Image (cartoon, grey):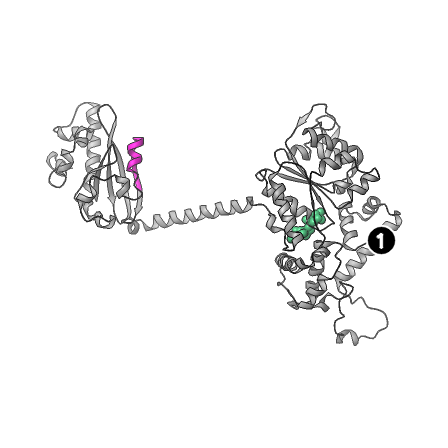
């Protein structure tokens, strides 16, 4: 405990100018200090004394103080503060006092304290003079108006003194940034238009058209054989469209039995059925509201549903199954098919009005055989992806292997190219794949040099020494042919027999060129 005289001592020699400052004179602090200090009997007096003691404590402990007026101008600095001036870039007080605080003290918050009238009791201030623990208090006149602010440097060299706290803070900040980065990564679309690999004129045209239609609102129709990248492009168009922040909902029409398709697309009203669906269920159109609906294999849509789809495309409204209440949605449709819709239309299997409605913005995806120049880049990308997913090393392709790949017809397009690359990689430990590594996978691949171990086996019965993927492929092929023969070419029935989806069957038919 100090006596009144020493409590006032801080205000005397070095700090005398602060007492003369009009801002300070009008502030509550000044009034407190000018009164003789005896223990007051009233509550207000006690408060005042408490405030004064706190102020004195700060003043005592402070490394420096500054006073700023309502216009943010520095009107006074303490003796202690002067030693920070060189680091702030000022030779002496006369250059500093009178300037606006935000011009001369980088990262100051004094201006904010003046504007809001709210104190910042403890804060870290870092600028070119170092890191400081500071306190900033607004000064008010009798009417409560802010007349300025007092800035107190409680600790200088806080960087060294508070190292544990600061490094903890830096660590938390780094963690936060990492979390933000991961979140942004997750939100980034899986496919962008740039994910469509290829620099052939045909591939560049596909990308140009995709960019153009992304901005539009109309329905997009993607036409191309299986494996030409229709699904990839649908994702990329959605991601580049104004709807990117909303959902892309996909449905493969060929994979869903006709009887379930309507409920799948349009939903079921509550109570429409007994049993599992009693509560009702949202359809894909409702789920995609505000976003994009990708209708894959649209050519497989049964005729009666085609008219219901046409109505949604025209009116953006539909009725869920078992409901007579119209539901309005805002959905952009991207449809795709590997089938020849015009031929289907001519046979009466596809409604012409729906076709014209879908065909507003058609994009044709060229098969691989029309752009053999892209095979190298595609093989690179696919090879990296195969390696990443399988844990195998990345393989490179010898010129004769590339030549071999480039002259294939690739009925299954990228999907088939991927299979072939994957199988060739599994069959060999060589990191550099030559044409002979594709023997058994591609009909015109050169035979590999005879293998010693097979020669030494007595050739009585043919042993299954072909590579396993090769054997699996021929087994699949035989099974599919047999199923189709049994069902007399009915693909849906064949798919059921084989316990695979119709879409999977179509993919395999294309991949095996059946
Ligand atoms: N141009 C391309 N660039 C990169 N990957 C492609 C390309 N085209 C197809 N793919 C890949 O090939 C596979 C099949 O493509 P997908 O979009 O499903 O074809 P589709 O829907 O036409 O049958 C996917 O893994 C896809 O990422
Ligand atoms: Mg597909």
- Residue annotated with mark 1: 481
Q: Is residue 465 visible?
A: yes
* Position of the N terminus by quadrant: top left
- The part of the chain drawn in magenta is 108-123
User: From the viewer's perspective, is 351 left or right of 233?
Assistant: right
Residue at horizontal 65%, vertical 61%?
376
In the displayed structure, would residue 354 be above or below residue 85? above
Q: Nearer the viewer, residue 133 or 225?
A: 225
Q: Position of residue 281 (x, y in %)?
A: 69, 31
Q: Is residue 130 magenta?
A: no
Q: Nearer the viewer, residue 48 or 227?
A: 227
- Residue 463 in which image quadrant: bottom right
Q: Position of residue 30 (x, y in %)?
A: 17, 30
In the displayed structure, would residue 479 be above or below residue 295? below
Residue at horizontal 79%, vertical 52%?
509
Q: Position of residue 360 (x, y in %)?
A: 69, 38
Q: Position of residue 223 (x, y in %)?
A: 72, 45
- Residue 427 in which image quadrant: bottom right
């Amino acid at each position: 405990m100090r006596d009144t005289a020493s409590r006032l001592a801080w205000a005397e020699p070095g700090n005398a100018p602060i007492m003369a400052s009009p801002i300070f004179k009008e502030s509550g602090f000044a009034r407190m200090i000018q009164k003789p200090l005896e223990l007051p009997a009233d509550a207000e007096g006690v408060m005042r004394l408490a405030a004064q003691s706190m102020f004195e404590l700060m003043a005592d402990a402070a490394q420096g103080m500054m006073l700023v007026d309502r216009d943010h101008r520095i009107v006074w600095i303490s003796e202690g503060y002067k030693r920070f001036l060189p680091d702030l870039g000022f030779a002496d007080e006369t250059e500093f006092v009178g300037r606006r605080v935000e011009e001369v003290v980088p990262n100051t918050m004094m201006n904010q304290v003046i504007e809001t009238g709210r104190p910042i009791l403890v804060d870290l201030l870092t600028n070119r003079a170092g890191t400081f623990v500071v306190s900033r208090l607004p000064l008010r006149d009798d009417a409560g108006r802010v007349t300025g602010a007092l800035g107190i440097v409680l600790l200088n060299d806080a960087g060294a003194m508070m190292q544990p706290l600061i490094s903890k803070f830096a660590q938390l900040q780094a963690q936060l940034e990492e979390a933000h980065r991961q979140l942004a990564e997750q939100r980034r679309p899986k496919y962008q238009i740039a994910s469509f690999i290829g620099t052939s004129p045909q591939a560049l045209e596909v990308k140009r058209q995709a960019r153009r239609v992304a901005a539009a609102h109309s329905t997009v129709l993607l036409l191309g054989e299986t494996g030409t990248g229709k699904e990839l492009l649908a994702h990329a168009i959605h991601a580049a469209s104004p709807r990117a922040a909303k959902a892309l909902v996909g449905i493969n029409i060929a994979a869903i039995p006709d009887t379930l398709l309507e409920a799948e697309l349009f939903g079921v009203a509550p109570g429409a059925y007994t049993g599992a669906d009693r509560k009702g269920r949202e359809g894909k159109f409702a789920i995609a509201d505000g976003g994009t609906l990708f209708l894959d294999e649209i050519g497989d849509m049964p005729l009666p549903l085609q008219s219901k789809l046409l109505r949604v495309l025209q009116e953006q409204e539909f009725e869920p199954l078992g409901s007579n209440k119209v539901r309005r949605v805002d959905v952009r449709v991207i449809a795709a098919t590997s089938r020849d819709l015009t031929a289907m239309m001519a046979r009466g299997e596809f409604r012409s009005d729906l076709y014209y409605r879908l065909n507003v913005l058609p994009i044709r995806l060229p098969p691989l055989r029309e752009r053999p120049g892209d095979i190298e880049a595609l093989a690179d990308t696919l090879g990296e992806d195969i390696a990443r997913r399988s844990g195998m090393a990345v393989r490179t392709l010898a010129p004769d292997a590339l030549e071999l790949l480039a002259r294939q017809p690739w009925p299954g397009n990228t999907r088939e190219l991927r299979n072939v690359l994957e199988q060739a990689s599994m069959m060999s430990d060589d990191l550099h794949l030559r044409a002979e590594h594709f023997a058994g996978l591609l009909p015109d691949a050169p035979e590999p040099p005879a293998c010693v171990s097979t020669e030494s086996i007595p050739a009585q019965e043919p042993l299954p020494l072909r590579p396993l993927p090769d054997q699996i492929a021929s087994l699949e092929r035989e099974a599919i042919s047999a199923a189709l023969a049994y069902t007399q070419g009915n693909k849906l029935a064949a798919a059921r027999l084989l316990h695979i989806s119709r879409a999977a069957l179509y993919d395999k038919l294309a991949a095996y060129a059946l």
